[in-house]
Image (spheres, rainbow, N blue to C red):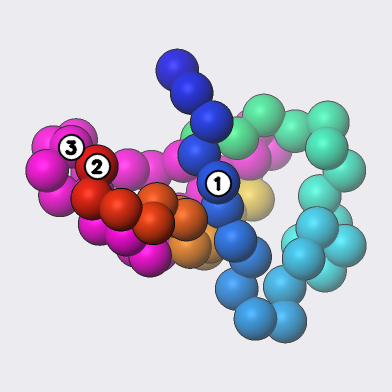
């Protein structure tokens, strides 16, 4: 487990997505680590089922 820096898409933020910071998040990453790319879009799903897209801020190859 680690920290993945994520960036909201243009026009979205915690307020517009109605996030409270009390959620738990699942970040959908490729199973194969070699498929993770800098600037890749990922789907984030909260524990209450809300999904949205963010950009993973991996600035170098993983």
Residue drawn at x 50%, y 39% as measured from the top left: 4
Residue designated by label 3: 33
Residue 47 placement, left or right of 41: right
Q: Which residue lies furthest to the bottom in this view?
A: 11
- The local secondary structure at tag 2 comes to loop
Answer whether residue 19 is magenta in the image.
no
Q: Which span is picked out in magenta?
A: 27-48
**Corner quadrant of residue 21:** top right
Say if 20 sits above or below 52 in the image: above
Residue 43 placement, left or right of 3: left
Q: Residues within 10 Å of mark 1 (few under 14, many from 20)?
A: few
Q: How crowded is mark 3: few (under 14 residues within 10 Å), some or many (20 or more)?
A: few
The reply to whether callout 2 and callout 1 are in contact (CB within 8 Å) is no
Front position in the image: 15 or 39 = 39
The reply to whether callout 3 and callout 1 are in contact (CB within 8 Å) is no
Residue drawn at x 69%, y 38% as measured from the top left: 48
Give me the C-alpha separation between circle 2 and circle 1.
Answer: 13 Å
Residue designated by label 1: 5
Q: Which of marks 3 and 2 is nearer the N terminus?
A: 3
């Amino acid at each position: 487990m680690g920290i993945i820096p994520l960036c909201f898409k243009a026009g979205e933020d915690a307020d517009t997505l109605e996030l409270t910071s009390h959620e738990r998040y699942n970040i959908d990453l490729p199973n194969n680590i070699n498929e993770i790319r800098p600037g890749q879009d990922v789907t984030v799903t909260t524990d209450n089922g809300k999904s949205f897209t963010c950009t993973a801020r991996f600035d170098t190859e993983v």
